[in-house]
Image (spheres, rainbow, N blue to C red):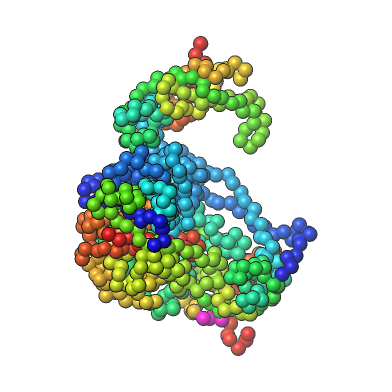
Amino acid sequence: MSLEKITDPRNMKHWLGHMETDYRYTLGIAGERFLNEIKENARIMGSKCKKCGVIYVPPRMYCEECFEKLEEWVDLGINGEVYTYTVAYLDREGKRLAEPVIYALITFGDAFGGLVHKLGEVKPEEVWIGMPVEAVFKPPYERKGSITDIKYFKPIQ
Amino acid sequence: MSEKIKSYPGFRIRTADFREGKVPYVAYRPKVRYAWSAGIAMSRFLEELKNGRIIATYCNSCGRIMVPPRVFCEECFKPADGWKHVKDTGTINTYSVSFIAGDASRIKEPIIVAVIDIDGASPGMGILHKIGEIDWKEVKFGMKVKAVWKPPEERVGSITDIKYFKPVKEETL
Amino acid sequence: MFGKKRVAIVGAGLTLFRRNLKETGKELAYEAAKMALDASGLELRDIQTVVMGTAPDAFDGVHMKGEYLADGAGARGKPYVRVFVGGGTGVFTPLAGWWHVASGQFDTCLVVCEEKMSSCFPHPAYAFTTIFDNILARPLGTTLIWIFALEMHRYMHKHNLKKEQIARVAVKNKKNALDHPCAQLGANITVEDVLNSEVLCWPVQRLDISPTSDGAAALVLASEDVAKKITDNPVWIDGVGWCIDSTLWTNRDLYYPDYVEYAARMAYRMAGIKNPPKEIDLAEPYDPFDYKELHHMEGLLLCRKGEAPKLTEEGVTQRDGDLPICPSGGLLGVGNPIAAAGLMKVCEVFWQLRGEAGKRQVPGDPRTGLAQAWGDLMQYGSVIILRR
């Protein structure tokens, strides 16, 4: 069959649609405790592997190196440092933001991993890799057990 | 199980626990929209539906007349050889009576859905459509049916330009 | 022999199957994988490669779900692949694990399947929306159950079957599941209960269908050399088969799954099985609906076409019958976290052949068992044959 070329775009048939799905993600065993500690006690916890000594942040239920179940939790305090950062000038839909937002990966001492969060009370040009920062929490009554219970991290003066 | 295993992991929660705030969670609704292009064969098929006709493609190697039409024969793996109009009548190959709508909600008037083998196409060449103008208890396998078209001015080039298929007596075909 | 190396299963793991589990998908994958490793006596560092099986991303609501699950499956820093063939995934994943080892490339392989369908609500069936033809089927208001109802009805029509004959499968499997510690829906029900349950899409009624579930399952595979070192009772993967038919399902006669037969013949040929009903001691065909167990018994050549309902009626397929079918309780009873459900069946055959199935143990010292899964648009068959 000679495939006919469609020259009139109106003859290009299409069908519009979307997938009507909603999602509800449970936080999991480790995630629930991690966020609950932020909510109730305003502290950042890691989970420690008894066998190989690694401390994971965010904490997990298992050690990905040796596959031990992690039962020991350690308080990492609220201070970390900027491991890397970026400055966002556009929002998710590509629109210009009124104020740029600084996103950073923040690490905590020797713990493995880190948290991705916003930086606040600092201008983009003042941020540097290795900068010490501390978590600024929402007041207790506003905290819901979400990563956004931490408003942002700010430089330690 | 292995019989040695004493307990199996898994922390059961109830759906109601979410409503009652007993289990924290993060909610999300993806904001994605799609436009699926009908493609070469299906664009022509839909245009023909607008004209009140069903069109097939055929393959000269295996001799099949194929509905829904496709630009290639999947058996011989070569381009189809041409277009051919087939009838708007057929036979019920299988059917179901649906008491649920697309969103799984319950409906009062059941929908009869069927695979209809189209006359003029090769045996077993069926399409999915609805059956109308008959009580669902009266539907039979092998029943002859004919397309009931929307009036020409209402057709848009969609499978729903056929409202449904209705039973017909064999001799009227 | 097809493969270069003979491949054994040396450990299995399974989580509970439930409508909602609190664990994340990664945590579920970990629990099953860890249990399988512990059962095999191996540690994660002994595992050379990991194969993951999991159904569409739209269920968990996690894109690149294979990658997401990798650390929970013990795959970080290892050769890793995710495979997906719809509902056929759970049995296809150990087949993919098999070729990793049979090829001689690896000596050990961890096979993990996970599903967390509860993330998608109000019903995971929504995530199926776009499996139907966007142009020809969806504008009609297609639901998932329509297509299975059409297949079931065609099967019933062709063999002149009554609903009662099919309902017996649901009764049997839910009863078997009472003995399964992970089961979601084990129950003592009657044929009447099935026939009186809500009609969704005739002939499909509420109790003809398996539930949606969260859960995970895992296996440890090893080459012959390794297997013989670490265990006295390996279970060998002696036959594998898989096959797909067209998505143009309205162009096929739905009364019989040819693609399952082709997959089964491939596996039987490899295993040297000439007379399946005689040589297979127990089978776990895929049973997301009660009629599918019958449909698949026929496609697997475990009986003649249209004969499966009669065997069920005669009790042949009961756990103590001549050919036990779904002694686990199947998807109808244990639950249906898609990929994990298929792998649960392989776990069941493994435990049965080792004589470790506890209350579910089929009598007669079974030596050869089969598991099969089915998926996509009623078009995919995957078959595995295990021997002690």
Residue drawn at (53%, 58%) of the image:
C131
The secondary structure that most of the magenta stretch takes on is: strand
Residue drawn at (39%, 43%) of the image:
C48
Q: Can residue C380 be seen in this snapshot? A: yes
Q: Horizontal and vertical percent for residue A119?
A: 54, 22
Question: Quarter-wise, where is residue C351 in the image?
Answer: bottom left
Q: Horizontal and vertical percent for residue A136?
A: 47, 20
Q: Can residue B167 be seen in this snapshot? A: no
Q: Horizontal and vertical percent for residue C375?
A: 46, 61
Name the outermost residue toward the right.
Answer: A7
Q: Is residue C327 left or right of residue A16?
A: left
Q: Which is more toward the observer, C133 or C275?
A: C275
Q: Is residue C300 magenta?
A: no
A51 lies above or below C49 = above
Q: Which is more toward the observer, A84 or A7?
A: A84
C343 lies above or below C202 = above
Q: Looking at the figure, which quarter contains the N terminus of chain C?
A: bottom left
Residue drawn at (46%, 76%) of the image:
B137
Name the outermost residue toward the top.
Answer: A157
For the magenta stretch, what is the residue range? Answer: B142-146
Q: Which is more toward the observer, C283 or B96?
A: C283
